[in-house]
Image (cartoon, rainbow, N blue to C red):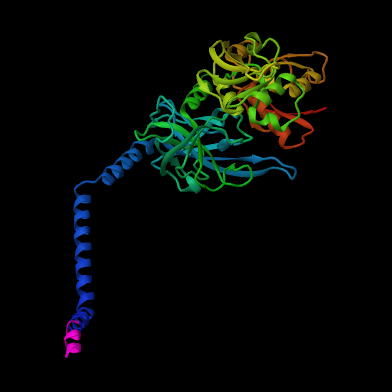
Amino acid sequence: MRRIEFLGPSLVVLAAAGVLLFVGPTAVRQVSQGMVASQMSSAEARLHSGSILDQMSQASRDVAVLVEPSVVHVSSSGIMSGRGGGRTFNNSGSGWVYDAAGHIVTNAHVVEGATRLEVQLFDGERREAKLLGADLRTDIAVLQVDAQGLVPAQREAQDPQQGDMVFAFGSPFDFRFSMSNGIVSGVGRAAGISEIEYENFIQTDAAINPGNSGGPLTNTKGHVVGMSTAIATGRGNGVSQGQFSGIGLAIPISMIDNVVDQLIDHGEVIKGYLGISMRNTEELGRIPIRDPMLQATAKNFQGDGVVVEYVSPQSPAELVGLRIGDVITQFAGQRIESVAQLKTLIASRQPNESVSVDAWRPSVENKSGQAFSVQVVIEQLKPETNSQFIVNVLRSIGVKKLATSTEAMAQQFQVPFERGVMVEEIVASSSVAAILPPGTLIVEVFGQKIAGLDDFYTRINRKLRSQNSAELMLGVRQQNGEVAQLRIPLP
């Protein structure tokens, strides 16, 4: 009898469990579905009432509406010379309207070597363009088109900062007038791109792909803060025009304004000169060192900076007492972390500008060294400073002096003004005196247009680095208006 009393409650529980097996899952599903439906209804109500996502979407649309009319698609074509003869090439990229005068800004590599240029406006209209000027060392070029009806971009006064939201516009993979967004991942980046000598890039994770080159990078107000230039691909040295992998690089607006305004006004860019050779401090431990001051620097200096390896005689650096072994830690109030950064900062300064330099000087007697500051007056970097080989070659054949052509120079030699390089002095008895007399205007080098003396030397140096050429090929403007190609053998 006790066993029956004991089993009674158990049978009740088993019976209840059996009922739940049939009824429970349905009830649970209904309750769950009801909760989901309620949550969806609440979410829909909130979204329709105007959520933060709506505001973000509307802001992005407003940026697109404001910026797109100033974006252009750039098409270039020309003939590329090679060992097997010339072949036609067609390139494309992006650009943007700089001002109401018809100036279009893009990357120099987008229009490199082009004999025909065309821009397509946001409404589909196409206009012929001409190259007004290019600075190969910063990869910035300015085109000129008919100004009627253009919508200039609005430009920000200052460079962006890490964390800022940005938008990239352009024609990735020829998907024209596209837009992507991201943030500024870093600033002051150097990527070791061989074609660009002055690097001070904005790093962004906004999607940038081939075809975006030259397109504007804007902030949340739709103001241009940079120009897309290159991307990291993870191959080779990691930077190229390959496929996007999360790291895009853009030229900051401060550098763009400085270069573009000079190209428009003068056709060339004046760069600052300090007069030192330098090396990253972390590289000192990897190379043989004989100089005792450099040895002391390698042994005792810790931290970020750039070490001075050589000081040019009578240079601004020598005049303020900078020496071999000194480590430059700040320039014009900016902390120095690499040679590429300091090189760019020096170049961006104008002649006669006074700049503060903070440095550390080693001591062979003790480990502490000495920190000091100086005010240095920047001079102008002469185009021939880094092209001494070409200068010597030209002098060996009788070319004594070249200069960027100006209107005053054209009047002096009584020739029509055109941007290029003017022959000012030549050895009368030389072999080239008859074909390059004073007043001769050189407008092309190896078939590519030049705007000034810096452009002239840069193109020759790049050609000689990439190909073992045995001659210089110069395009000279003749009296009949045609360009004659002169071939000058190299020693």
- The number of discs equals 0
Q: Does residue 214 sit above or below 353 in this rendering?
A: below
Q: Residue shown at 23%/62% (left/top)?
A: 36
Closer-to-camera residue (120/347): 347
Q: Residue shown at 48%/43% (left/top)?
A: 208
Q: Is residue 95 visible?
A: yes
- On the rendered image, what quadrant is the C terminus found in? top right
The range drawn in magenta is: 1-9
The location of residue 92, given as percent across then percent down, is 53, 42
Closer-to-camera residue (386/328): 328
The location of residue 368, given as percent across then percent down, is 62, 18
Q: Is residue 402 visible?
A: no
Q: Is residue 7 magenta?
A: yes
Q: Is residue 429 magenta?
A: no
Q: Quadrant of residue 456?
A: top right
The location of residue 381, given as percent across then percent down, is 63, 17
Q: Quadrant of residue 437?
A: top right
Image-based side of 441 in relation to 269, left or right: right
Q: Main secondary structure of the magenta part?
A: helix
Image-based side of 60 in relation to 20, left or right: right
Q: Residue shown at 22%/54% (left/top)?
A: 43
